[in-house]
Image (cartoon, rainbow, N blue to C red):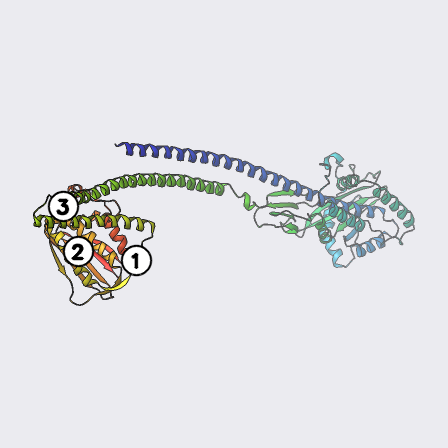
Amino acid sequence: MTTTSRRIFLYWLLLLAAALGVGAGAWLLLEREESRLSKRTESAEAARRAAVEARAALVAENVELLVGDVEAGLLDTLAEAPAENLDAVLNDWERTNPLVRTAFRAAASSGRLLRPAIGNRSEEARGFYRRFATRLSAQPPWRPVKLSYEEFSSSSRKKGDQNVETVQNARREVQALAKDRSSYASNSAQSGSASALSGQQEAKVKGRSLSEKAEVADFAVAERAVPAAKAASVAPVADRRGWLPLVADGRLHLLGWVWPQNASEVRGVEVELAALVSRLGGAMPVEVAAGEGYALRDDKGRVQHQAGVVAASAPTVRVPLAATLLPGWDVVAFLAVAPEESGTGSFFAVGASLAAVLLLAILTSGSLLLWQARRSEAEAAQKTSFVANVSHEFKTPLTTIRLYSELLEQGRVADAEKQGEYLRTIGRETQRLARLVNNALDFSRLEQGKKQFQRERCDLGAELGRLMDVHAPRVAESGMTLRGSLPEKPVMVTTDRDAVEQIVLNLVDNACKYASDGRELSVALVGRADGGAEVRVSDRGPGVPVSERERIFEKFHRVDQTLTAEKGGTGLGLSIARQLARGLGGELRCEARPGGGAVFVLTLP
């Protein structure tokens, strides 16, 4: 391995090591960032889920509070109803209060219905008898064992959500509606005392805080299913009350009852469930974050109220309501995965792609730099060789001219024939030196793009005939015979005479150097149908290998053969010839000649 190849190999190793180091570092950083983003996404998702769970629980608590307010208010109103003209009071209550479906009275001991009366022919009364008469007489709900308040109080109500004001408004509305006594205010002599008592209770409630009101409501909810613990034959010592949720005709029904102190009968009410449910919408959130949804569902799974987007899929969170309030009902919450948090796989893929692009860019740019450095190094070597060759090429004709001119100047050549030969040699060497100078100048102009062409209309056949007459002796000196094949008719083209002459002379000079063993050189001109022309310079030399037919037109390139190595040259002749041909709008190419040799074809427009 040469020193240059070894150095380039080391450069490649350094570049590859740097690129692999950058790639490994980028990969580690991407994995670390992916892990961090995954943890952050999981934490954010857990926080969102916890917030949704808390909010769903709060909605459930608000629904329970509203239902408890309604139930407590209805039972308070029922308990305060005057015993006199009670049926008339209950009739007015049914007619004026939308929350009351049916009011009833039953015997405390047997549970037998006293109101609605058996003879009542109204559809609502018949339906009430059909649904509940047997159930109440078989197992009166006011006779089970009393449970402690602590067993019904699960936890304190938390306030502070942004929907508290909405829930409070809804609670105030249902409380006012459930405790409306206007229907029987004028039906009893005790209405005045009842109003006074109601005013005192309202004043007490207004003076309490929100938490105290919630505790009062919670206690009322707890008391709705806490009946007397003693047998029915024993008279109660205080008011007892409670609620009984029943399913009849495939629907949920809520029955509330009050056993007044020292009374032999129980008063009760069936809630108009549709009116109650319509007022539970106030417990739903007013504002819902994107991707969240909340719904209140009944025991059949039907959505009664909703806020936000409720999906058809399984809910994320489910909070059942108290079985003693609305059995089978629940509050559900839905949480959609945010698009920006759908995963870090895309981030890792994009990051890995960018790292791969960076790695590829480093390798590509490094390769280009190494290639450019190697090319510049080769061009520098070629230019060094070019300078040496040009110097040698200049030195040879100058030496000959100087020698012969000194001999002639000193009069040391007396023979007139030799004097003429020396003068002709000086002329030929002068022309050779001029061609070298022109090539060098044209190469410089072509490289800088400053070559100017003087185009004019001319007969290409006549120009080629003149060139052949002038350079025939030089071709003969190389041992070759110059033959021309020119058309008799003029071939008119618009081109630069000097450029065409220089192209043809370079081709003839190459043939004299490298194809002289073939003993034949021909120049042919063929007119083209499009108005252009082709100049074909053919020889019978060794020819040009297929792999070299394009490379020979590169600057400083010479075919690596013994023949070319023994001949002097700069490696610019064919490169300049092709650049001149293309500058004229034509082309110069190399082809194989049938029977051996090479053909250089100059195409002019």
SS label for mark 2: strand
- What is the CA distance from the residue labelled 2 to the residue labelled 1? 23 Å
Residue 126 at x, y percent in the picture: 74, 56
Residue 217 position by quadrant: top right
- Residue 503 has which mark? none
- Looking at the rendered structure, the kind of residue marked 2 is Val
Give the labeled residue for mark 1: 453
Residue 271 at x, y percent in the picture: 75, 51
Using a 10 Å C-alpha cutoff, classify the residue at mark 3 as few (fewer than 14 neighbours), some (14 to 19) or many (20 or more): some
Give the labeled residue for mark 3: 408
Check whether the beta carbons of the residues at disc 1 and disc 3 lie within 8 A of each other: no
Give the labeled residue for mark 2: 537
The reply to whether residue 603 is visible in this rendering is: yes
Check whether the beta carbons of the residues at disc 3 and disc 2 lie within 8 A of each other: no
Q: How many discs mark residues in the rendered view?
A: 3
Position of the N terminus by quadrant:
top left
- What is the CA distance from the residue labelled 1 to the residue labelled 3? 40 Å
Q: Please tell me whether mark 3 or mark 2 is closer to you in this view.
A: 3
Residue at coordinates 79% horizontally, 49% vertically from top-left? Answer: 178
Q: Please tell me whether mark 1 or mark 3 is closer to you in this view.
A: 3
- Left or right, 125 with respect to 43, comes to right
The reply to whether residue 148 is visible in this rendering is: no
